Amino acid sequence: MPFADVNGTQLYYRIEGDGEPLILIPGLGLDHTYYQLGVPALSAATRTIAIDPRGVGRSDRDDSGEYSVETWADDIAELIAALGYDDAHILGTSLGGSIACALAVRHPNRVRSLIAVGAFTELNRSVELNYALRQRLIAKLGMGAEMADFIALWIMTPQFLESEHGRQVEANIRAGVQRNSPETYVAFLDAILRLGRREPGDGPRALTAALEKVTAPTLVACADNDHFIPAELSRVIHDAIPQSTFVEIPGGGHIPFIEAPELITAAVVDFIESVRNGRFTQ
């Protein structure tokens, strides 16, 4: 199995296709299969490298029990080097998008381009409440079926859940969520909550404020019907990064790579081609 030793841990990764490297960073507590519906199209245009971040899937757990977007970002920077690349296109969704943004801030020389989908670099009140409520529910119920149902209700749209394909995906998501131990998942939630919420009248939180340093061409994308991470948090990222463009995916839900894979992969491939050919414009 393909593993890389980075920063004192082992990361699992899966490579498909040929061409310029594209790192795929999944959302909270989910593994490299997160992008499986998008990989066929993405790997036809790039060399996809789908990863299990530290603490997830086949990658090692952190003995300290502490995680952060900065540590995850540093791991991926080391992975790029370990695989023999100077840099790579970086794609992250949801928490994976937060990690991708941190990577672009902390290791700009490793980022050929940045793609943040349904991402956030700070929280609003509803998102903060959602993640904090998960911690309280886990304390009472563990990572059982109730917790998996709660997460599925937030990350997939009602219309998608009614479809046969949606029910199949729901079962996979529920199983993936439940493979996390309660202690590890709570530690992941701690990492998210440390990003912080911007109070009325406050300036941007630390990661958002640092985005002005990002020099890589950037695509910020979200769905028009994401009822979990609202479009306003993607626009915060877009507004903060000087060289960024913004696209909204119709009907994509919180995870467009699940609910609208053709649309989001087309947007990503077109963006990467524009970077490769010098056509990228804000």
Image: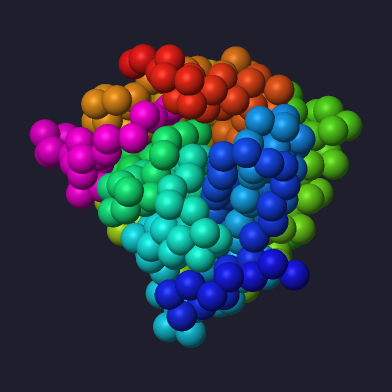
Q: Quadrant of the N terminus?
A: bottom right
Residue 16's place in the image compared with 276, above or below, is below
Residue 159's place in the image compared with 71, above or below, is above
Visible in this render: residue 164? Answer: yes
Q: Position of residue 273 (x, y in %)?
A: 54, 23
Q: Position of residue 89 (x, y in %)?
A: 49, 40
Toward the right, the furthest residue is 164
Q: Nearer the viewer, residue 202 or 279?
A: 279
- Please report the residue visible at 36 percent of the width from the left and 29 percent of the height from the top: 217
Visible in this render: residue 236? Answer: no
What range of the chain is rendered magenta?
198-222
Is 123 in the magenta? no
The figure's colour scheme reads rainbow
Whether residue 37 sits left or right of residue 238 in the image: it is right
Is 215 in the magenta? yes
Q: Quadrant of the C terminus?
A: top left
Whether residue 229 sits left or right of residue 41 in the image: it is left
Q: Nearer the viewer, residue 57 or 75?
A: 75
Whether residue 199 sits left or right of residue 161 in the image: it is left
Residue 231 sits in quarter? top left
